[in-house]
Image (cartoon, helix red, strand yellow):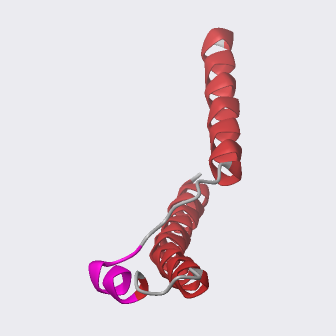
Amino acid sequence: MKQEKKENDFLDIKKKIFLILSFLYVVSSEAQCAMCRAALESEESGVQAKAINDGIVYLMVIPYVLVAAAAYAIYKIKFAKKKEKV
């Protein structure tokens, strides 16, 4: 019984560490559609192209945040029901 508790504690710690590290991990990405690339390749300074890339990456983040918020809400609802049963 104590062995199972130790294993569960270890898995909980492992999950928490993974979650923290996944939030701290940053990847620089260059995202651009074919139309934007064709329109911006003619510009020589590259300032506008960088701004377009930043905007596209920003728009890509929003769906992930919404899915994470929905998952968190479902998680909270699920465990609230479990606590009521106990």
Give the total of numbered labels. Answer: 0
Q: Is residue 81 above or below residue 54?
A: above
Q: Quadrant of residue 83?
A: bottom right
Q: Quadrant of the N terminus?
A: top right
Q: Position of residue 82 (x, y in %)?
A: 54, 56
Q: Position of residue 24 (x, y in %)?
A: 71, 50
Q: Quadrant of residue 6?
A: top right
In percent of the image, x 59 and y 51: which residue is there?
86
In percent of the image, x 65 and y 34: which residue is there?
12
Q: Is residue 3 above or below residue 41?
A: above
Q: Is residue 31 left or right of residue 45?
A: left
Q: Position of residue 73 (x, y in %)?
A: 54, 71
Q: Is residue 16 above or below residue 43?
A: above
Question: Magenta segment range?
Answer: 32-39
Q: Main secondary structure of the magenta part?
A: helix
Q: Quadrant of residue 58?
A: bottom right
| Residue 36 belongs to the span the image colors magenta | yes
Q: Is residue 75 above or below residue 4?
A: below
| Residue 68 belongs to the span the image colors magenta | no
Q: Position of residue 70 (x, y in %)?
A: 49, 73
User: Which of 35 and 55 lies nearest the eye of the viewer?
Assistant: 35
